[in-house]
Structure formats: structure tokens, C-alpha cells
């Protein structure tokens, strides 16, 4: 691998995707429809605004057709210090998109000596989703959620996307993936503006639990194997993942409160 | 038809080397020290925006002296090289040694084949979990690579600064001690350097993924004492 030096006219600047293109390293668009093959899908993710910033959470299940293909995949990732990205859709392309997005943000920051603004990051992700449109049309759709702490405005903000790269900023919460209908309803009923992160983590946990009951593609807490959804809080201190032990305790509390009601979880 | 004058290859190389050395000597120096807390890089730089010291990758830093546009071009190429390599293989496969060799190739090629050699000296440093494993590669204008241990100085008056630093240097220094010693060595006896005159960064030994941190403003003034 030689040192990538460019003439002034052909310089890709701080854009890592452009650099990859100039080196011929961009993966080709699949020319086989996904329907002909069984690929893994990542499912339910949620993001909720809170007083400290944003809470993000995602279950751990990936499905391929009617089967569970992975029990422990992660769908919530740090994008950089002050932002996170959660993925739903075709698992392989989604994870590749996250990896590229993380690199893109870090590459920009190192080349320019200054991080992108939160809007800039959200636009970058929108562009990556839009570039995936030909693949999405073949059935390899990736629909991420993006959330971060805006250091200029000092608030948490969150963004939802559609397959065309359309970027929609949400004021309260955003959901994505197969269980989004159920998760969205639970959050809608429990949401309070400017609530504490602690309360919204419980809401996210409860939303994922309720969704797992209704949607076969969403995984619930696995108390036997010790697998719990990934939960993270993004605030003025940056992206911080909530410890598994903490998430486990919240699930056990939730289960205990349901048992006290005589096991009624309708 | 005019015939070019014959110039002996020795003379040609010497002229080029003198040209590059003069250009580098005009700029201000910088020093890097491997100490207990990590690798500290301290540069004399009055600008707050035109950086001499920067991050390349998780545990790798870059520093350059001489012509800003030339070493900044090399810095960006290094960031690109590291990010491409990390993307193609894995983050663990990005190392300072191979990057330093790439720099040496480019500088050597430019020195012998281009009209004008690059008037730069650069440092590629990689911090390890133990100070014995720290790597510092000092690459000269003609592509010569030196593998330094302990401390190194780049730029004008490098020898006298290295002498001053060598007398005091201790591998067990903490950040504050290292900054004070580096500032004293860079300034010499006739003057003192304030926080505003310095650009300081450290590759922190104990840290998460990205080891590179700048030490600026009040924090730097406090450590300078």
C-alpha cells in the first residue's frame, strides 16, 4: 500500500468515501435481488430525547427469513465522541455502512483538525443511505437512526432516514425496524418532554420488551445466556454505553413488576 | 545548441542537501520525549491554527518542521494511508514503522528526482503500553530514517537543543516535568517560552482507542508552572 498523494485538482479533501472511490475500493452494487437469497436482517431500534441528550437502544436479534440467524449482534454504535448510530435493515450492508460512517467522521476530524457539526454528520449519513438506494431497490435496504449531542446548541438531537436518504429530524423520539410500530406506541405513551435519562432508559427497555412479545423478529432479554439489548446515552460527556448489569437489573425490575400484577402482560 | 555544464553527482546532492537544510533551519524546532505517561511532543509554534503536531491514527502521531505546506501535505497523506489500511485490514494492522517507510520513500524520491527537495523533517511516533515499546521515527528531507529512543529533536539548532535535553532527560517523568524540560531545552538560556509560544500534544499511554490529546490553554499554562 503506497502513500496516497494527489495532484491539487484530484484531491479528495477530507472525504473518506471519495478517497475509497479514487482507490477503487467501493463495494459493487449487488445485481441479484435479495429475494433470491436469504440474508440477515437487523430489527428494532429506538432513540428517545431526554434532559441529558438522547437515549438509544436496540435489541440483539438478527433474522434470516423465519429463522433467527444471530442472537448477539449489536445495532447501536458510537459514530464518534458525541453521536451514535442505530441500524435496521439488511445486517451486512448496515454494518458496513456504520463502519464507513465512523471512519468518515474520524477521517474528516483528523484531516481538517476539527469535527463536523451535528448537522454535517447527519447529512453525511443521509448521503450514504442515498448512495445505497440501488442496493435498497434490490432488497438490501439500510435504514439507520442517528442521534447526537449538538455541542453548539447544547441539546440532544435525533434524525430518522428513509431508504432514499431523506433526513427527518424528530423532536421527541424515533424508531426503526420491524418492531417500530409496537415500540413507537409504547414510547409514545410513556414519553415526557425533558425527562431524566434514567427514566427514558426504562422506557426504552420497556418498549423493546413489549415489542419482543409482539414481533417475532425482535429479541427480548435473554436471561439464560445473559444477552441484553444495547442501551446508550449520548449527552454532554459524549456517547456512553449503559453497562449490561444495569440493563439486566432494569429488565428484572420490569419482570418483577409484571409478576406482581399476576403475570398479566397484555 | 547549448551544452549543460557538467556537475558532479556529489556536488549535486550536496547542493540539494544544503538547500533543504537551510530551509529547515529557518523554522523553529520541536522535540518528542518518551516518558512514563506517554510520548510528549512539544513544538515552538506561535500559531494556534497552523499545526505542527497532529493525530494520524489511534496510537500514532505526526510532527513536522520546515515548510508548512509540504509537511501538511505529508500529514494528510499519512492520515489517508492509515485510514485506508485500517479499513482494508484492521485497526491493529496500522503501525508507525510502515508509515515511516512510506514517508521515507516519498522524501527520497523527491530528493533525487524532483527539481527541489522537500524542506521538511518529520516524526512519526507510536505509543505502546510500556515505554520500552514506544517507537519514534525521525525522517529527514532525503528519506533517511532514524529510529530514535528516549527523545529526539527536529528542526533548527537541533544539536544544541538535544544536548540541553539530554542532560536532564528522565524516562520516569510525568507530563508536567516533560513539558517544563522540553520548553527549557527549546528556549535555551537567553529567553523563556510561554504557553502561547508552544504547541503541545501527548500520545497517552493509558487510554481508550484514540491516544492523541492536545494540551492547550490554561491546562498547558498550569503544567508549565
Image (cartoon, rainbow, N blue to C red):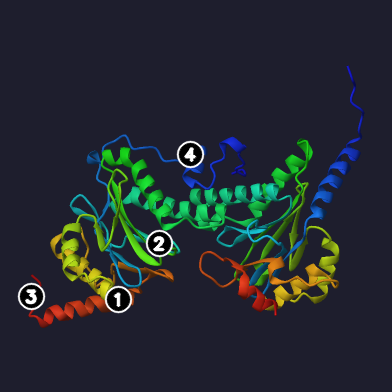
| Circle 2: element type | strand
- Answer whether residue B41 is visible to the viewer in this image: yes
Disc nearer the start of the sequence (2/3): 2
> Which residue position is annotated with label 3?
A264
Q: Nearer the viewer, mark 4 or mark 1?
A: 1
How far apart are the alpha carbons under marks 2 and 1? 19 Å
* Side of A160 where B187 appears, left or right: right
Q: Chain of mark 3?
A: A
Identity of the residue drawn at 91% across and 35% down: B8
**Does the CB distance between marks 2 and 1 fall below 8 Å?**
no
Label 2 neighbourhood size at 10 Å, few (<14), some (14-19), many (20+)? many
Label 1 neighbourhood size at 10 Å, few (<14), some (14-19), many (20+)? some
Identity of the residue drawn at 82% across and 71% down: B191
> Which residue position is annotated with label 4?
A21
How far apart are the alpha carbons under marks 4 and 1? 44 Å
> Which residue position is annotated with label 2?
A83
Q: Chain of mark 1?
A: A
**Does the CB distance between marks 4 and 3 fall below 8 Å?**
no
Disc nearer the start of the sequence (3/1): 1
Q: Which residue occupies the extreme front position in the image? A: A153
Q: Chain of mark 4?
A: A
Label 4 neighbourhood size at 10 Å, few (<14), some (14-19), many (20+)? few
Q: Position of residue A109 (x, y in %)?
A: 52, 56
Disc nearer the start of the sequence (4/1): 4
Q: Position of residue A72 (x, y in %)?
A: 31, 63
> Which residue position is annotated with label 1?
A196
Identity of the residue drawn at 41% across and 41% down: A27
Amino acid at each position: 500500500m503506497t502513500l496516497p498523494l494527489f495532484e491539487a485538482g484530484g484531491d479528495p479533501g477530507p472525504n473518506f468515501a471519495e478517497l475509497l472511490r479514487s482507490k477503487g475500493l467501493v463495494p459493487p452494487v449487488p445485481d441479484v435481488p435479495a429475494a433470491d437469497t436469504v440474508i440477515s436482517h437487523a430489527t428494532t431500534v429506538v432513540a428517545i430525547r431526554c434532559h441529558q441528550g438522547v437515549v438509544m437502544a436496540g435489541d440483539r436479534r438478527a433474522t434470516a427469513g423465519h429463522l433467527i440467524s444471530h442472537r448477539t449482534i449489536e445495532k447501536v454504535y458510537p459514530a464518534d465522541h458525541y453521536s451514535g448510530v442505530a441500524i435496521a435493515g439488511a445486517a451486512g450492508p448496515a454494518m458496513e455502512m456504520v463502519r464507513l460512517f465512523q471512519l468518515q467522521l474520524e477521517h474528516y476530524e483528523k484531516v481538517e483538525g476539527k469535527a463536523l457539526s451535528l448537522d454535517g454528520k447527519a447529512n453525511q449519513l443521509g448521503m450514504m443511505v442515498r448512495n445505497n438506494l440501488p442496493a435498497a431497490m434490490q432488497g438490501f435496504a439500510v435504514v439507520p437512526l442517528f442521534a447526537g449531542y449538538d455541542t453548539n446548541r447544547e441539546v440532544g438531537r435525533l434524525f430518522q432516514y428513509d431508504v432514499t436518504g431523506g433526513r427527518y429530524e424528530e423532536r421527541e423520539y424515533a424508531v426503526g425496524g420491524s418492531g417500530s410500530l409496537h415500540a413507537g406506541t409504547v414510547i409514545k405513551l410513556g414519553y415526557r418532554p425533558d425527562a431524566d435519562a434514567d427514566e427514558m432508559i426504562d422506557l426504552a427497555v420497556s418498549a423493546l420488551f413489549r415489542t419482543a412479545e409482539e414481533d417475532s423478529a425482535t429479541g427480548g432479554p435473554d436471561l439464560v445466556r445473559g444477552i441484553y439489548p444495547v442501551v446508550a446515552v449520548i449527552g454532554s460527556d459524549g456517547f456512553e454505553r449503559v453497562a449490561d448489569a444495569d440493563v439486566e437489573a432494569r429488565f428484572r425490575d420490569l419482570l418483577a413488576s409484571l409478576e406482581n400484577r399476576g403475570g398479566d402482560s397484555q | 545548441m547549448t551544452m549543460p555544464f557538467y556537475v558532479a553527482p556529489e556536488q549535486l546532492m550536496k547542493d540539494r542537501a544544503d538547500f533543504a537544510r537551510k530551509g529547515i533551519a529557518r523554522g523553529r524546532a520541536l522535540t518528542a520525549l518518551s516518558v512514563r505517561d506517554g510520548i510528549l511532543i512539544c513544538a515552538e509554534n506561535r500559531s494556534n491554527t497552523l499545526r505542527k503536531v497532529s493525530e494520524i491514527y489511534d496510537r500514532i502521531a505526526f510532527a513536522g518542521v520546515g515548510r508548512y505546506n509540504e509537511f501538511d501535505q505529508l500529514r494528510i497523506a499519512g492520515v489517508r494511508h492509515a485510514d485506508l489500511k485500517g479499513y482494508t485490514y484492521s485497526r491493529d494492522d496500522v503501525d508507525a514503522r510502515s508509515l515511516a517507510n512510506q514517508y521515507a520513500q516519498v522524501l527520497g524520491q523527491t530528493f533525487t528526482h524532483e527539481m527541489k527537495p522537500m524542506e521538511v523533517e518529520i516524526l512519526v511516533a507510536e505509543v505502546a503500553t510500556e515505554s520500552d515499546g514506544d517507537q519514534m521515527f525521525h525522517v529527514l528531507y532525503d528519506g533517511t530514517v532514524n529510529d530514535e529512543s528516549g527523545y529526539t529533536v527536529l528542526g533548527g539548532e537541533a544539536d544544541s537543543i538535544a544536548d540541553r535535553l539530554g542532560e536532564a532527560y528522565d524516562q520516569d517523568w510525568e507530563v508536567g516535568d516533560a513539558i517544563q524540560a522540553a520548553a527549557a531545552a527549546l528556549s535555551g538560556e537567553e529567553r523563556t517560552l510561554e504557553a502561547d509560544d508552544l504547541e503541545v500534544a501527548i500520545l497517552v499511554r493509558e487510554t481508550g482507542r484514540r491516544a492523541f490529546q492536545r494540551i492547550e490553554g490554561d491546562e498547558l499554562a498550569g503544567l508549565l508552572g
